[in-house]
Amino acid sequence: MKKYKLFVLLLFVGLSVSANEYNASFFGIKSDGITNNTGSIQKAIDYISEHRGGTLVFYVGRYLTGTIHLKSGVKIRLEEGAILVGASSPYDYNSKSATKALIEADGQSNIGIYGKGVIEGSGNALIKNTNDLLSLGYIRKDSEPALVSLSNCMNVSFTGIHFWNGPYNALVLNGCKTVNLEGLDINGKNIATSAGIVLNGCKWVNLKDLFVEVKKTPLVNLNNQFVTVQNSITSKGISL
Amino acid sequence: MINYVKQLQILILALGLSIPLFAKDYPAASFGAKNDGVTLNTSVIQSAIDFISENGGGRLVFAPGVYLAGSLYIKSDVTLHLEEGAELKGSANPFDYVQDKHIGWMSFIFSVKQKNIGITGPGVINGNGFTVATNMVSYIQRGLVTDALSYDRPDAANRPTNIYFRECEKVLVAEGTQKDPACWNFVVDQCTDVMIDRIKIDSKAYWNNDGIDIVDCERVVIKDSYIDASDDAICFKSHDASKIGQDVVVDNCTVRSSASGLKFGTVNRGGFRNFKITNLKVIDTYRSAITIQAVDGGLVENILIDGVKSYNTWNAIYLRMGDRWSGDKTSTLNNVVIRNVYAEIPFDKPDAGYRYEGPVEDLPRNISPSSIVGLPDWRIKNVVLSNIEIVYPGGSNPHYAKRGTSKQELESIPEMHQAYPEFSQFKELPAWGFYVRHADNITFDNVKLKIKGSDYRPAIVIDDAKDIDLKNVSIEEPGNKNKKEIIMNNTTKKGGK
């Protein structure tokens, strides 16, 4: 019994350590809306992941960024009024992954974004800039980035967040297991090409209290197992 | 000597002709680069460079404005062209810079293993280095970056240089200003066929800010340029013991430094061969106008320095052999001609008031002479000094620092085999004008040494030297009647005299 208590205590200590919180400013991340924070946000995620995990906290402000990669054990909390703003040049989404996105992860576990803040896709500006580069022949035709794209991840949770103005899909999940999407507001009503959630080859997915207002398909559900959808509707009040 | 000088003259012409005429200009704005000074353009500019490189080459042209960016890699057949009023400015955030895995250094602008690259145009490259370096200190203190913070500043590898080119062929850097790096300014490392023409460098934003470092390169021309640096201004280094930097020309440059103006070393593992320096002006420089150092096992040979004007610089000429990092190798310093030099040495610190001025040293010493100092076994050989005039300030005080000229006093001067080489390293030396030790076949031809006040020391001391030739050496010292101005110990003159 004593040993068991000690074990519980150790477990608790372990958990509290892994729940370390870090302010974004600790990593030099700026909330002014014009400083591109890609380097600092990525450094923050890498650092937290390498130091037993924890939460990176963004307080009120606009945090401009290009593509960032989530790593195991790192959660991002967006406080009310905190906005992760996607950069408006397609060159800022220079990932080599199959499904490019503002926020990407591949093969990571225990990741997620929660809070009352916003992920802003800057969709119209991004689409315009992309078309300009296409017309000059500088880039090839490609799909616009998603807001979030996760592949082969486990224990994924997105709760409470507003997904705004994605140029294309809001969330794309491929081959992920144990996924909780809850209380999300996905809004692309001003973007002609906006779409909602794509689930492909996932297992144990919970969708709850979602509101999806997009111009294209609100939910693609392919080859998944054990997907539950509760109280989730489109802007027309239709269940997902 | 004459042969290689001719070859070097041809080199200038050849490099001038080999500058490629690029077919196409691409406005940076067309890729979406913003000149507002706040948008981080790293990805946009890099993508533009990649596109141009993959599509036949050309110039990426920056119209006036400030373009903020982190680390960039120039690729083959691409020239960054900065128009008048255009500034490529380094991000303030150290996390926007790459520490290149191949090189081990951080830089704002890299090029690694590329051909036909360039940076041209009258615009500015601004490393924003003071801010980057101080932000880096703050990251280190938070534990985000590992660094010993030796000397309470980030290690060189944790501070971006402005430009680092490595293993590139056909490099052109012309016109324009490079300023405020966080580390060395412009490093050209193991490159071939390099033309640096009409550039201006202002490199005083942080410690270790060298101006130009030419490391283990072949066929390099630096001409018509102005360099102001808190560390060495024009610096030749050899980092690789298997390489030799060779066939290098420097012509018509003006330099200012809180270290040395033109320096061979300190790191010299492989060596330097066939260098020609002409029409060099050195001003307000803390250490030596010209210093040639062989202390790490490298060779130095066939060096011609012709035409130096040095004002307000604390030392004119310092040649040194040592045994710092030599390992199994033996340094050599051989065949050096220094001619047509005029130098004025001040009494007071020459770089006082410059940003990051040179570190004050533990004294005492009176004003130091020019020196040629080898080691007992590793001797500096075949040096010609001709048409040299050096004017000293006087004002030495034997009660403050004194080194006499008796045999015993001369031979008790420490050898300092492993010490970092600087003209001031021996503290007080026994001559006010020129000091030579452990050197063979040294010729003074038409050398004039002047001093403005009388000095307790003789003008020239030569100790442990063979085949010394003093032709037309004149000494001007007020009130020096009956003073012996040239003292030799254990020295033979040329021709056995």
Image (cartoon, coloured by chain):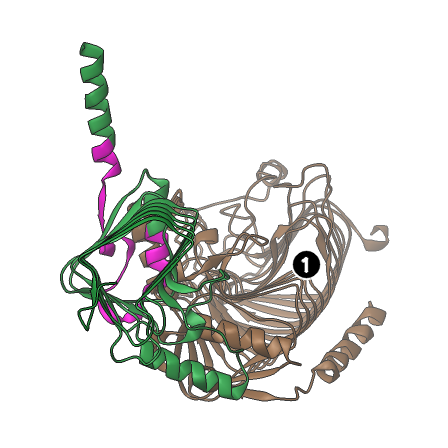
Chain colours: A green, B brown
Queried whether the magenta region covers residue A18, the answer comes back as yes
- Residue at (19, 73) in percent of width and height: A236
Where on the picture, by quarter, is residue B316? bottom right
**Chain letter belonging to callout 1:** B
Question: Left or right: where does residue B3 sit relative to residue B236?
Answer: right
- Residue at (52, 44) in percent of width and height: B403
Segment tinted magenta in the rendering? A15-44
Amino acid, disc 1: Asp
Q: Picture coordinates of residue B293 (x, y %)? A: 63, 53
Q: Is residue B225 visible?
A: yes
Quarter that holds the C terminus of chain A:
bottom left
Q: Picture coordinates of residue A57 (x, y %)? A: 21, 53
Q: Picture coordinates of residue B171 (x, y %)? A: 65, 73
Where on the picture, by quarter, is residue A129? bottom left
- Residue at (46, 53) in percent of width and height: B156
Q: Mark 1 points at which residue?
A: B216
Give the residue at the far left of this rendering: A80
Where on the picture, by quarter, is residue A232? bottom left
Question: Left or right: where does residue A76 sit relative to residue B459?
Answer: left
Quarter that holds the N terminus of chain A:
top left
User: Could you tell me how many numbered marks the image carries?
Assistant: 1
Q: Is residue B352 above or below residue B438?
A: below
Question: Left or right: where does residue B467 sit relative to residue A210?
Answer: right
User: Along the line of sight, which residue is nearer the eye, B218 or B487?
Assistant: B218
Queried whether the magenta region covers residue B218, the answer comes back as no
Q: Can residue B279 be seen in this view?
A: no
Q: Is residue B406 above or below residue A2?
A: below
User: Along the line of sight, which residue is nearer the eye, B263 or B76?
Assistant: B76
Q: Picture coordinates of residue B70 (x, y %)? A: 43, 67
